[in-house]
């Protein structure tokens, strides 16, 4: 009997966590998942998939069985494409998020402060249309899949952490666009009258969203700080989860991180990051296959 069959008979449930990481993160995760699937790791069989920011785009493609097609898209010539972030300066965004990491004001007040920055010069009537269209072009489906898919975001007005799913009433494309709305780079996205920003403003992975599962695979584009005023960090969550679940974290290695460059939001990172993800999949496939079943 294979481990997968034994897992099914024993009723072991599996959760997959896909973290944030910008344009490069989408590419790397897509390459990684494509490689793992090619190596026989059935990630589509996850009982629940949670995506944060870039991870939400990859999660939707996985649930739509479109990872290979999404991977191929990363080799399209970007010469005629418009940079998603335009000519925006990231320095203020980096400063505000950095202040959030070291904040001692409490998670909600800290995220509210970041939300205030995200909402500066924000016009809900016009500002989110481009973001929704941009994310929509990356998605193969427009309706929520039947299989459990969860997308994280943060209410920019209240600082409240939100998880959207098929029962939330939120539009799928808007949910993903909201999860990808990096403060100061992309405007918050309106859902049910509320402005939402990047789910990474709580955690880069939000791995605790699938805490009810017994085997959890976390895909992270980079290390998280050991502590953060914005929300739970990956190391803390993993420590808590390991008291009741098997957890494996696959993080972008040195080669993959180098492919991301200094700005993971640039289109120039797409091809090299996707290739790096595919190569890393070859290096970790045996470990992930043994863990996942």
Image (cartoon, rainbow, N blue to C red):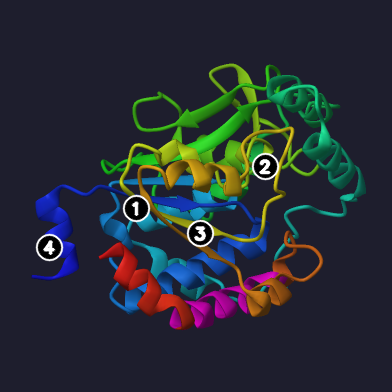
Residue found at x 52% / y 83%:
279
Residue visible at 14% across and 54% down?
8
Quote the CA–CA distance across marks 2 and 1: 24 Å
Magenta-colored stretch includes residue 273: yes
Direction from residue 237 to residue 272 in the image, left or right:
right
Q: Which residues are magenta?
A: 269-282
Quadrant location of the N terminus in the rendered image: bottom left
> Quick one: SS at disc 4?
helix
Q: Nearer the viewer, mark 4 or mark 2?
A: 4
How packed is label 2: few (under 14 Cα within 10 Å), some, or many (20 or more)?
A: some
Q: Earlier in the sequence, mark 1 or mark 4?
A: 4
Residue 63 is tagged as 1
In the picture, the disc for residue 45 is none
Q: Which residue is mark 3?
A: 219
Disc 3, disc 1: CB below 8 Å?
no
Q: Secondary structure at mark 3?
A: strand
Q: Which residue is mark 4?
A: 5
Image quadrant holding the C terminus, namely: bottom left
Query: Which disc is residue 130 wearing?
Result: 2
Q: Are marks 1 and 4 in contact (CB under 8 Å)?
A: no
Percent coordinates x, y for residue 277 in the rendering: 54, 74
Image quadrant assignment for residue 289:
bottom left
Relative image position of residue 13 (x, y in whole percent): 25, 47
Q: Earlier in the sequence, mark 2 or mark 1?
A: 1
Q: Nearer the viewer, residue 73 or 253?
A: 253
- How many numbered tags mark residues here? 4
Q: Position of 90 compared to 44: left or right? A: right
On the question of residue 291 being in view, the answer is yes
Q: Which is the main secondary structure of the residues drawn in magenta? A: helix
């Amino acid at each position: 009997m294979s481990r997968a069959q034994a897992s099914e008979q024993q009723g072991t449930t599996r959760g997959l966590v896909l973290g944030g990481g910008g344009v490069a993160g989408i590419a790397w995760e897509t390459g990684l998942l494509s490689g793992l699937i090619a190596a026989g790791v059935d990630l589509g069989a996850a009982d629940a998939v949670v995506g944060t920011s870039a991870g939400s785009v990859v999660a939707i493609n996985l649930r739509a069985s479109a990872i290979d097609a999404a991977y191929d898209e990363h080799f399209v010539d970007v010469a005629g494409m418009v940079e998603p972030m335009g000519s925006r300066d990231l320095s203020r965004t980096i400063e505000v998020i950095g202040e959030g990491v070291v904040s001692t004001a409490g998670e909600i007040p800290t995220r509210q402060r970041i939300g205030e920055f995200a909402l500066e010069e924000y016009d809900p009537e016009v500002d989110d249309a481009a973001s929704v269209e941009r994310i929509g072009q990356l998605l193969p489906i427009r309706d929520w899949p039947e299989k459990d898919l969860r997308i994280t975001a943060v209410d920019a007005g209240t600082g409240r952490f939100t998880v959207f799913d098929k029962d939330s009433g939120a539009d799928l494309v808007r949910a993903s666009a909201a999860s990808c709305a990096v403060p100061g780079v992309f405007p918050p996205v309106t859902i049910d009258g509320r402005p939402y920003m990047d789910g990474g403003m709580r955690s880069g992975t939000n791995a605790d969203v699938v805490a009810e599962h017994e085997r959890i695979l976390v895909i992270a584009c980079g290390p998280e700080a050991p502590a953060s005023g914005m929300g739970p960090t990956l190391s803390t969550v993993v420590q808590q989860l390991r008291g009741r679940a098997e957890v494996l974290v696959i993080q972008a290695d040195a080669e993959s991180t180098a492919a991301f460059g200094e700005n993971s939001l640039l289109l120039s990172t797409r091809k090299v990051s996707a290739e790096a993800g595919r190569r890393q999949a070859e290096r970790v496939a045996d470990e992930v296959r043994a863990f996942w079943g």
